[in-house]
C-alpha cells in the first residue's frame, strides 16, 4: 500500500544574497492515514520549516511532498494548519473565522444552510459554539486555539498540521486542550502532523515521534514508536512503564546525543 | 487623536443601608442613578472646555472693547452678524447668499474631491503596498509631489480645466490623496504574514484576499490616512475658494474682508472650525464602525 503522506528526500536551503544556509537535509518520512505523528527538536532545528513545506507555505529546494501519491507544493485546505499564534482574523467573529474556510472549501458541495450547520458542528466539536458571536480579542488564549482547531477541522483536511498548537498556553489550559485534541483524533480519525518541543506532549499524543537533529542541515535523527493503547489517560500514563520508557528515549536523544548548542 | 470617549461606567452598586437584613444580590441600580451617572460623566467632559471658552471670550471682550481696537469684541461680532446667524438660508442671487449655501457649496467640492481621492488613494496605496516594483517606481514621485503646497496646484489646474469648479475639486483631490496613499501602503505592507498564510491555506483568490483580508487588516491605517486627508482638504478648500471666487465659504471670507466686515470673517472662521471638527469626527466615527473598534485612534 502506498504511503498516505510522504516526505521524499526533502532538502531546504535558504539563500539570502550570496549567503546560503542549509536548514533541512534529506528528510524522508511516510505517514499512514489516521496516524498521529509528532516532530520534536530544539528550537531552530527547522521543524517549523518542515511543517510549512508540508503545508505548501514554503517551497522545497529538493525533494517533494506526496499526499495520496500526488505532489503537493502549494497551500490548500487539504492540509489545514493550526497556527501557533492561532492567527484568527480579529475583525471576524468566531463563527465568521470558521465560516471563511467552510465557504471556500464547500462552495459548490454544500448550500448555505448546510455550510452554516457544518460551521456550527465544528464549533460544537471544540465546545466553542457558545462564543460564536465573540471576536478573538474577547476570548481567552485557549479558546482562540480551539477556534483555530475548529477552523482547520471544518476544512475536512486530509492531513491536519499542528504548529506548536499549545506552545503559547499555560500548563493547565494546555493539558485540557491536549485532551480535547486526543478525543477529536479518536473520534474523527484524522491524520495529524504536529510540531512540538514538549516531550510529554509528544509521547502523550503521538503514535510516532520524529526526532530532529540540531540545525543547520537538520536531519531526522530517530523515529520512535509509541506503543500505548488508546484512549490514553494522562494520569494513568504517568506511572506506565512504556510511557516512561518512551519519554526517556526522547529525553536522551534531545539532551544527551543532540544537546542544544547555543552557538549553532 | 485619542478622545478617551470609551469610559465605561463602573457597574458596582453599593447597598447603602446598614440595617441588619439578609444580604441579597444587589438589584440593578435604579434607572435614575444611571441617568445621573451619565449626566455627571458628560458634564465632566463638557464643562471644562466651556469654562475655558468663557474665559477666552471674556479676555477677548476686554482686550477689544477699548476704543481704537482693530478687531471687534465678541459682543459686537454677535450684534453685527445676528442676521447671518439666524437666517442662514436667504438667497438674494449671485453670491449674496446665506452662510448655509456658502458652506454647502464648499462641502460639495470637498465631498467630490475627497471621494475621488479616497478611491484613487486606496487603490494606489494598495498597489504600492503590495508590489515592490510599484513602490520603487512610484514612491519617489509621490514623495516629491506630496510636498507641493495645495495652492501651487491651483494655477495649473485652472489652466487645464479653464473653470473654477473642477479646479477647486482637483486641488482638494491632490491635497488629500497623499496621506491616503501613504497610509494605505503602510497598512498593506504591515499585514501580518499569519493572515497571508491563512488566506493561502483557505485558498482565497486575489479578489477575495483584497476584500476579506487586505482591506480589513489595513483599515486602521487607511482610516488614519482618510482622517488626515479630510483635514487637509478642508484646509485647502478655504484657500482655493478665496482665489477662484463664486459661492463658497472661502470666498465669503475674502468678500467680507474686501468689504471690511470683520465680524463676518470671525463668524465664518467659527463655522469653518466647527465643520472641520465635525468632518474629522465623522471619519473617526466611520472608522470605529467599519473596523469594529480596532482603529488606531
Image (cartoon, coloured by chain):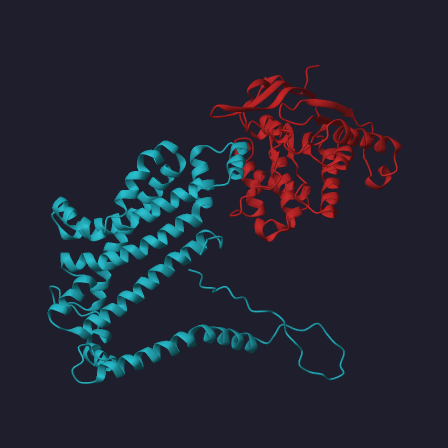
Q: In which quarter of the image is the C terminus of chain B?
A: bottom left
Residue at image location 18% in from the left, 70% down from the top: B90
- Which residue extends farthest top? A1
Compare residues B240 and B65 and report the one nearer the observer. B65
Answer whether residue B100 is visible to the viewer in this image.
yes
Q: Which shade is chain A?
A: red
Relative to residue B206, is residue A161 drawn left or right? right
Relative to residue A171, is residue B36 drawn left or right? left
Residue at image location 55% in from the left, 74% down from the top: B34
Compare residues B27 and B12 and report the one nearer the observer. B12
Res. B96 image quadrant: bottom left
Q: Position of residue A180 (x, y in %)?
A: 73, 41
Q: Where is residue B137 in the image (x, y as percent from the top left)?
A: 31, 34
Query: How many numbered tags mark residues here?
Result: 0
- Residue B104, compared with residue B22, is above or below; it is above
Q: Position of residue A82 (x, y in %)?
A: 62, 36
Compare residues A122 and A45 and report the one nearer the observer. A45
Which chain gets the cyan colouring?
B
Relative to residue A218, is residue B234 drawn left or right? left
Q: In which quarter of the image is the N terminus of chain B?
A: bottom left
Res. A102 image quadrant: top right
Answer whether residue A106 is visible to the viewer in this image.
no
Residue at image location 71% in from the left, 33% down from the top: A188
Q: Position of residue A123 (x, y in %)?
A: 64, 43
Residue at image location 45% in from the left, 61% down from the top: B2
- Residue A264, compared with residue B276, is above or below; it is above
Amino acid at each position: 500500500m502506498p504511503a498516505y503522506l510522504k516526505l521524499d528526500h526533502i532538502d531546504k536551503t535558504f539563500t539570502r544574497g550570496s549567503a546560503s544556509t542549509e536548514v533541512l537535509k534529506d528528510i524522508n518520512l511516510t505517514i499512514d492515514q489516521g496516524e498521529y505523528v509528532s516532530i520534536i527538536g530544539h528550537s531552530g532545528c527547522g521543524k517549523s520549516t518542515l511543517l510549512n513545506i508540508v503545508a505548501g507555505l514554503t517551497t522545497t529546494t529538493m525533494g517533494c511532498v506526496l499526499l495520496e501519491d500526488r505532489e503537493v507544493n502549494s497551500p490548500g485546505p487539504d492540509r489545514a494548519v493550526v497556527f501557533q499564534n492561532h492567527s484568527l482574523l480579529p475583525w471576524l467573529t468566531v463563527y465568521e473565522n470558521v465560516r471563511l474556510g467552510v465557504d471556500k472549501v464547500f462552495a459548490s458541495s454544500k448550500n448555505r444552510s448546510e455550510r452554516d450547520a457544518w460551521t456550527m458542528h465544528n464549533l460544537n466539536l471544540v465546545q466553542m459554539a457558545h462564543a460564536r458571536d465573540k471576536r478573538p480579542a474577547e476570548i481567552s488564549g485557549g479558546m482562540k486555539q480551539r477556534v483555530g482547531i475548529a477552523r482547520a477541522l471544518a476544512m475536512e483536511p486530509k492531513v491536519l498540521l499542528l504548529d506548536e498548537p499549545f506552545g503559547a498556553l499555560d500548563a493547565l489550559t494546555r493539558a485540557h486542550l491536549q485532551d480535547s485534541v486526543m478525543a477529536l483524533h479518536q473520534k474523527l480519525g484524522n491524520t495529524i502532523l504536529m510540531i512540538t518541543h514538549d516531550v510529554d506532549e509528544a509521547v502523550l499524543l503521538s503514535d510516532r515521534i520524529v526526532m530532529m537533529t540540531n540545525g543547520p542541515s537538520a536531519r531526522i535523527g530517530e523515529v520512535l514508536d509509541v506503543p500505548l493503547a488508546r484512549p490514553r489517560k494522562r494520569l494513568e500514563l504517568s506511572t506506565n512503564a512504556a510511557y516512561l520508557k518512551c519519554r526517556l528515549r526522547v529525553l536522551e536523544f534531545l539532551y544527551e546525543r543532540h544537546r542544544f548548542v547555543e552557538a549553532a | 487623536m485619542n478622545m478617551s470617549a470609551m469610559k465605561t461606567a463602573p457597574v458596582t452598586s453599593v447597598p447603602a443601608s446598614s440595617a441588619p437584613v439578609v444580604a441579597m444580590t444587589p438589584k440593578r441600580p435604579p434607572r435614575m442613578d444611571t441617568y445621573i451617572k451619565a449626566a455627571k460623566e458628560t458634564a465632566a467632559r463638557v464643562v471644562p472646555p466651556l469654562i475655558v471658552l468663557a474665559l477666552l471670550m471674556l479676555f477677548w471682550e476686554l482686550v477689544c472693547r477699548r476704543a481704537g481696537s482693530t478687531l471687534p469684541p465678541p459682543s459686537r461680532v454677535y450684534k453685527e452678524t445676528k442676521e447671518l446667524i439666524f437666517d442662514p438660508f436667504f438667497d438674494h442671487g449671485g453670491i449674496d447668499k446665506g452662510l448655509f449655501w456658502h458652506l454647502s457649496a464648499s462641502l460639495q467640492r470637498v465631498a467630490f474631491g475627497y471621494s475621488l481621492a479616497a478611491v484613487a488613494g486606496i487603490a494606489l496605496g494598495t498597489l504600492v503596498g503590495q508590489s515592490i516594483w510599484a513602490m520603487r517606481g512610484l514612491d519617489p514621485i509621490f514623495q516629491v509631489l506630496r510636498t507641493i503646497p495645495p495652492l501651487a496646484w491651483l494655477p495649473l489646474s485652472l489652466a487645464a480645466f479653464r473653470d473654477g469648479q473642477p479646479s477647486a475639486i482637483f486641488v482638494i483631490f491632490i491635497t488629500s490623496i497623499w496621506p491616503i496613499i501613504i497610509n494605505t501602503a503602510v497598512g498593506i505592507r504591515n499585514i501580518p504574514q499569519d493572515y497571508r498564510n491563512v488566506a493561502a491555506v483557505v485558498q482565497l483568490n486575489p479578489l477575495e484576499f483584497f476584500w476579506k483580508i487586505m482591506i480589513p487588516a489595513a483599515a486602521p491605517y487607511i482610516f488614519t490616512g482618510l482622517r488626515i486627508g479630510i483635514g487637509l482638504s478642508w484646509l485647502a478648500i478655504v484657500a482655493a475658494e478665496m482665489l477662484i471666487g463664486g459661492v463658497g465659504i472661502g470666498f465669503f471670507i475674502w468678500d467680507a474682508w474686501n468689504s471690511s466686515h470683520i465680524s463676518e470673517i470671525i463668524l465664518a472662521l467659527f463655522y469653518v472650525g466647527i465643520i472641520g471638527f465635525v468632518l474629522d469626527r465623522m471619519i473617526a466615527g466611520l472608522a470605529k464602525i467599519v473596523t469594529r473598534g480596532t482603529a488606531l485612534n
